[in-house]
Image: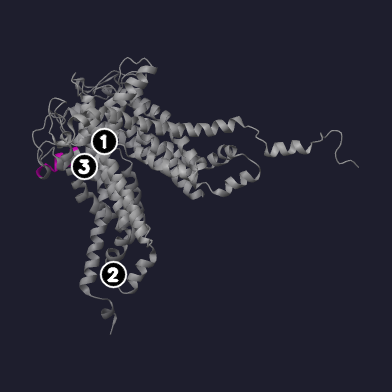
């Protein structure tokens, strides 16, 4: 009895080996992989071109002005203008965010993770915070304009850095809450139980055990939200940051911030001078990018440092 | 010795109770903020609607100073700019995510991932500058023949660049959530790697990819600075459905309405800020809620 009939083609050993191990090309699959690589390279190239554009455009300012560009005030000519009022404004906004959003955000996270009963109300608060994180920045500007500039005028004296800082603080609050919640969730339950076991109250457990353990994660979240606060421009436009001449750097008068300067200078028509608006806009943008990246890098370094310390390395 | 003695120091207990109240208050602040956002927007929008005839909303063109508020102008503007942004963000973001999750050797990944995070950290004004000074003259200006250097295509590409990292991050999470057993089963029946990715992994991760697209779309519609800087119109303009024409998004209309608000804070040209804000708020909120539902579906599945 023949196992292989006439109808079945006899296959040689070589043919089988080739079909299993051979380099039979699969065009569709290769194109697919190539597509993903192109997408990745494209993304990286865009980032590279963006940074290169910023640096080449900013170069005349960096070489010509140096530190002067950072310490000089605003001016009507791009050749003498500096970003000092912007740095001052951004710094003040950062401080206000630190004072307002951080304690409030961390406290809310502690409540949600440690105290809140698993009720519908708690669930509502959590969902609400997630939704707040997705609200466009410009909406926080509208909120700031109405509440901090309008209703709270006796406190903020209108369109000031205080109103802008509060608007940005509200904007980053959900981010602070979400990152802190994650950090607190990662604290092992045993730490809490050990605290309760020796008779500590809930607050004592939180203060002495949970918060110190979660501190690196919370700190990372804080730095990231500061980076975000630094780069936001939309709420500042709505609250009324000044883009023109600004004589002073004050807490209760007209103000500006670094992203506002980038916004304003980018759109100005050429002044025909050697160092043009495009150059100072790029230099201000580069300053902003460097600051934001420094903050992000600090967050990463801090995270790694604390993790290593905790693991006893 | 009784229960009172065991219950501990009164001062410590009172302090504990006080802290609980304080912490709960902090958590409730976020609810108050949401309520205030809604209140401010709705009140302003109602004020706006009582100041104008509803007919002014179906006008063609957006000229707040002349009391013409053609909603179609800014809605279509937002849809076109957002659509272009998604045309940029979905292929680049998803492709990057597939490469990083399925193909990249861990050494490549450990280098590329932080670089993508750098892109995510670039402030939107800087991307706006880039759109204005590079994409407009060097890309759109060369490839197409726009009537104006600043137009909706430039703004859309800029916003697309901004949302690529979000698209990539959320999709990569979705791809990584697909259990390895599915891939192994596919390899087990002799499928190629690319076949496995296309026929097994991507379909399994489809909810997450949809979620990523929706969340990215929400960001694209809500993105303000690039639309304001590169859209080409300073607060008013005719209706246009061509990407190569200058256009106005809802967000750009808002910054412009507020920008000229030094004079009157009660007229319709200013109050339209709240109406547009409410519209934007509802659109992005709707997208976020739908996107969130898809994200949760991924979590429940695996």
Give the number of the disc on residue A167: 3
Are dots 2 and 3 on a single chain? Answer: yes
Tell whether position B291 is magenta. no
Q: Is residue B38 visible?
A: no
Q: Secondary structure at mark 1?
A: helix
Q: Secondary structure at mark 2?
A: loop
Where residue A252 appears, as percent x and y from the top left, is 9, 41
Q: CA distance from mark 1 to mark 2?
A: 42 Å
CB atoms of marks 1 and 3 within 8 Å: no
Q: CA distance from mark 1 to mark 3?
A: 10 Å
Residue drawn at x 57%, y 41% is: B200
- Residue hosting label 2: A201
Q: Is residue A69 visible?
A: yes
Residue located farthest toward the right when viewing the structure as drawn? A1
Q: Is residue A235 left or right of residue B111?
A: left
User: Pointer 1: residues within 10 angstroms few (<14), some, or many (20+)?
Assistant: many
Q: Chain of mark 1?
A: A
Residue drawn at x 14%, y 25% is: A77
Earlier along the polypeptide chain: callout 1 or callout 3? 1
Residue drawn at x 55%, y 30% is: A31
Where residue B287 appears, as percent x and y from the top left, is 38, 37
- Residue hosting label 1: A138
Q: CA distance from mark 2 to mark 3?
A: 36 Å
Q: Which residues are magenta?
A: A145-154
Residue drawn at x 27%, y 52% is: A105
| Residue closer to the observer: B106 or B279 | B106
Residue located farthest toward the front when viewing the structure as drawn? A63
């Amino acid at each position: 009895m023949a196992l292989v009939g006439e109808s079945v083609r006899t296959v040689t050993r070589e043919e089988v080996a080739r079909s299993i191990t051979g380099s039979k090309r699969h065009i569709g699959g290769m194109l697919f992989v190539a597509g993903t690589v192109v997408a990745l390279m494209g993304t990286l190239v865009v980032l590279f071109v963006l940074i290169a554009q910023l640096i080449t455009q900013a170069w005349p300012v960096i070489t010509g002005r140096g530190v002067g560009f950072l310490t000089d005030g605003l001016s009507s000519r791009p050749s003498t203008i500096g970003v000092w009022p912007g740095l001052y404004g951004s710094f003040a906004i950062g401080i206000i965010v630190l004072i307002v959003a951080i304690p409030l955000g961390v406290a809310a996270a502690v409540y949600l993770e440690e105290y809140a009963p698993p009720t519908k109300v708690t669930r509502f608060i959590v969902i609400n915070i997630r939704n707040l994180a997705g609200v466009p920045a410009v909406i926080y500007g509208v909120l700031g304009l109405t509440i901090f500039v309008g209703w709270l005028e006796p406190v903020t004296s209108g369109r000031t850095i205080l109103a802008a800082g509060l608007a940005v603080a509200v904007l980053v609050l959900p981010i602070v809450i979400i990152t802190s919640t994650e950090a607190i969730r990662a604290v092992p339950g045993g730490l809490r139980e050990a605290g309760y076991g020796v008779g500590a109250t809930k607050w004592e457990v939180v203060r002495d055990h949970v918060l110190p353990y979660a501190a690196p994660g919370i700190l990372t979240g804080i730095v990231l939200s500061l980076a975000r606060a630094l780069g936001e421009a939309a709420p500042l436009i709505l609250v009324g940051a000044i883009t023109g001449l600004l004589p002073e750097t004050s807490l209760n008068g007209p103000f500006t911030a670094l992203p506002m300067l980038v916004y304003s200078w980018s759109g100005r028509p050429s002044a025909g001078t050697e160092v043009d608006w495009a150059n100072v806009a790029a230099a201000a943008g580069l300053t902003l990018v460097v600051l934001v990246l420094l903050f992000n890098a600090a967050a990463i370094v801090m995270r790694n440092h604390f993790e290593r310390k905790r693991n006893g390395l | 010795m009784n229960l009172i003695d065991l219950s501990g120091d009164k001062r410590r207990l009172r302090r504990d109770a006080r802290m609980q109240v304080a912490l709960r208050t902090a958590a409730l602040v976020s609810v108050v903020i949401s309520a205030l956002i809604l209140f401010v927007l709705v009140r302003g929008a109602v004020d706006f609607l009582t100041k104008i005839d509803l007919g002014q909303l179906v006008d063609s063109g957006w000229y707040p100073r002349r009391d013409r508020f053609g909603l179609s102008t800014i809605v279509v503007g937002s849809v076109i700019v957002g659509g272009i942004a998604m045309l940029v963000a979905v292929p680049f973001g998803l492709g990057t995510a597939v490469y990083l999750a399925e193909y990249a050797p861990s050494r490549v990944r450990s280098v590329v991932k932080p670089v993508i995070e750098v892109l995510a950290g670039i402030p939107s004004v800087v991307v706006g500058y880039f759109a204005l000074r590079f994409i407009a003259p060097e890309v759109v200006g060369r490839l197409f023949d726009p009537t104006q250097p600043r137009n909706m295509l430039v703004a859309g590409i800029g916003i697309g660049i901004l949302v690529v990292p979000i698209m990539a991050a959320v999709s990569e999470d979705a791809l990584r959530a697909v259990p390895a057993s599915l891939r192994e089963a596919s390899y087990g029946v002799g499928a190629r790697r690319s076949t496995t990715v296309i026929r097994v992994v991507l379909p399994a991760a489809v909810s997450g990819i949809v979620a990523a697209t929706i969340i990215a779309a929400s960001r694209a519609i809500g993105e303000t600075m690039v639309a304001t800087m590169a859209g080409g119109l300073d607060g008013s303009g005719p209706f246009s459905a061509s990407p190569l024409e200058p256009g106005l998004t809802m967000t750009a209309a808002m910054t412009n309405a507020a920008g000229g608000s030094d004079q009157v804070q009660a007229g319709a040209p200013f109050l339209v800020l709240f109406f547009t804000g409410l519209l934007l708020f509802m659109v992005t909120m709707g997208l976020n809620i739908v996107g969130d539902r898809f994200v949760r579906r991924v979590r429940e599945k695996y």
